[in-house]
Image (tube, grey):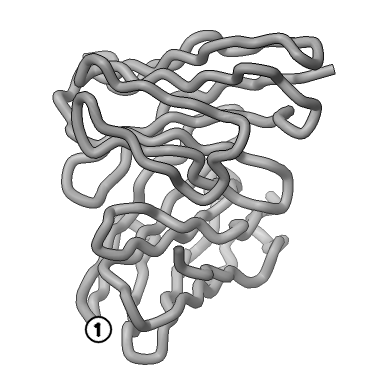
Amino acid sequence: ILNVEQSPQSLHVQEGDSTNFTCSFPSSNFYALHWYRWETAKSPEALFVMTLNGDEKKKGRISATLNTKEGYSYLYIKGSQPEDSATYLCAASGSARQLTFGSGTQLTVLP
Amino acid sequence: NAGVTQTPKFRVLKTGQSMTLLCAQDMNHEYMYWYRQDPGMGLRLIHYSVGEGTTAKGEVPDGYNVSRLKKQNFLLGLESAAPSQTSVYFCASSVGHEQYFGPGTRLTVT
């Protein structure tokens, strides 16, 4: 079981601001890093899965990077919109495909 | 294609009662998982299954049992519910490393 930490715990930004948050994980016994978007009263929705050091993924205004050597990943949101308000979960998996989740970053975008 | 479904959506139990939560997926996924979600703690893995007829313990298995008699179904049982098991329970299934989640079951144990 990996120890996954996310920061900050919560974040308020103004509409149009760009923002980023961090996920850290132990670099040993690592296979993949996942980002999920989780809206209240809904299921977590997969955003990205990354496995290789230096990986960068992008989906619209959201992007993520991965550094497996130092054990961190960043999630970036460019030009935040109120509909981006959600909890963003990071999870790391080892070879057994078990995910260990961080406690999430709760993002609120103020109009 | 319904994806991952869970029943029931809500349930209130008294301490000591038993119940079974059902997870079903129609994507022919081999792997299935049960998580619980508590405030400030993210999702924690209870049990998982790598295929029909197999189950394994996750991070917080105590007080729960599971069965995977059919590939599409993964059952989570509470034999004697305790207030500490009040939580939101999520089921997931996966192909590769991407997991697909159900809508959750909110369980309250009084």
Residue B34 spot, x, y in % from top left:
45, 34
Q: Give the left or right position of residue A26, taking residue B79 as reference.
A: left
Residue A5 vertical position relative to residue A102 in the rendered view, above or below: below
Q: Chain of mark 1?
A: A
Q: Secondary structure at mark 1?
A: loop
Q: Nearer the viewer, residue A68 or A97?
A: A97
Q: Which residue lies under the disc numbered 1?
A: A54
Q: Which residue sits at x=50%, y=31%?
A: B90
What is the residue that sits farthest to the bottom in this orientation?
Answer: A70
Residue A53 vertical position relative to residue A47 in the rendered view, above or below: below
Residue B83 spot, x, y in % from top left:
80, 27
Q: Which residue sits at x=31%, y=65%?
A: A94
Q: Which residue sits at x=26%, y=69%?
A: A31
Q: Nearer the viewer, residue B12 or A9?
A: B12
The N terminus of chain A is located in which quarter?
Answer: bottom left
Q: How many marks?
A: 1
Structural crowding at the residue carrying mark 1, measured as other residues with C-alpha within 10 Å and reported as few (<14), some (14–19) or many (≥20): few
Q: Give the left or right position of residue A16, taking residue A52 as reference.
A: right
Residue A32 spot, x, y in % from top left:
28, 65
Q: Which residue sits at x=55%, y=60%?
A: A102
Residue B41 spot, x, y in % from top left:
66, 52
In terms of image quadrants, where is residue B71? top left
Q: Give the left or right position of residue B17, taking residue A24 as reference.
A: right
The amino acid type found where label 1 is placed reads Gly
